[in-house]
Amino acid sequence: MEPLTRRKFISIAAVSGAGLTSLNVHDQLARSEGGPGAIGQANDGLASVDGDHMTEEINKEKIRRAMLAGPSSVTAEATVAEIDHQGNLTVIRQGTNEWVCIPGDQNVVGRPDMALDPMGMIWFKDVLARKPKPTNTSPGLIYMLNGATQRSFTDPFDTTSPPIPIGPHWMVLWPFDAKAAGLSTVMRDAGTMVMFAGTPYAHLHICGSPWEGNEYHRSDRGVWTMRYERR
């Protein structure tokens, strides 16, 4: 056996003392905080704080995305909420005007972010409920200025056809008659069409933003482009 020198003894005592001190501090902390489970509770508390922070950051992103769905003049004071397949709303931020902005999920077909007025919300909930016809009593508005994906241009209840990408657009939700109004029923990346034509859910679908183009000023000179077709 190696002889116990004075230097060796001091080294062992120092290590042992540090270990005892650590155990003593741990014991005092446990007693002062309410027992051995207090340290675990403290860890749970830290996890809770992290979880709350994560939820707050996620909600901030949802609010940011939802507010881009429509014009700032309506989204700035709008309520931001999520909507489930039954039409139930979960409010993320309470607003002060009549509009509701939905953050949606661009990774899921048919779940775009959008801004809806009250009649637009009635119309949209009727689609979710698969009602025979919409129940809004006046034209509704829905903005989808970040674009969307959906399954069909002709059947509002189609959930199986391949997804169709659609650019920024907005909708006037009233049963327009395409033939009587002389409007197209063919989707384009610009212009106006009647979507779901011939069904109770027919409505005016306008691709682009209402604020595209240059504003008019009195000093502006009008420049008109005309195209002639050869006979």
Image (tube, rainbow, N blue to C red):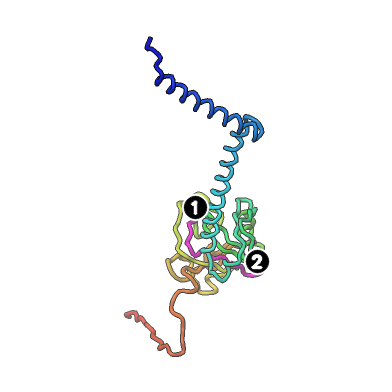
Q: How far from the left and from the top, in percent, is residue 75?
A: 57, 66
147 and 225: which one is in front? 147
Q: How far from the left and from the top, in percent, is residue 10?
A: 44, 22
Mark 1: few/some/many CA within 10 Å (<14, 14-19, 20+): some
Q: How far from the left and from the top, in percent, is residue 156?
A: 55, 57
**Looking at numbered disc 2 in the image, what kind of residue is underneath it?**
Thr
Describe residue 10's horizontal placement relative to residue 43 as left or right.
Answer: left
143 and 99: which one is in front? 99
Residue with the mark numbered 2: 96
Image quadrant holding the C terminus, namely bottom left
148 and 151: which one is in front? 148
Residue 148 within the segment the image draws in magenta: yes
- For residue 119, above or below residue 228: above
Mark 2: few/some/many CA within 10 Å (<14, 14-19, 20+): few
Q: Residue at x 45, y 61 (%)?
A: 166
Q: Residue at x 54, y 64 (%)?
A: 197
Q: Report if the CB atoms under discs 1 and 2 are less than 8 Å apart.
A: no
Which element type, helix, strand or loop, lies under badge 2?
A: loop
Task: Give the farthest residue toward the front.
Answer: 6
- For residue 90, above or below residue 123: above
The magenta stretch is: 136-151
Residue 177 within the segment the image draws in magenta: no
Q: Which circle's residue, 1 or 2, is located before the other in the chain?
A: 2
Which element type, helix, strand or loop, lies under badge 1?
A: loop
The answer to which quarter of the image holds residue 28 is top right
**Looking at numbered disc 1 in the image, what kind of residue is underneath it?**
Val
**Total numbered labels placed on residues in the image:** 2
Q: How far from the left and from the top, in percent, is residue 67?
A: 54, 63
Q: Residue 109, which numbered label?
A: 1
Distance, label 1 to label 2, CA atoms, is 30 Å
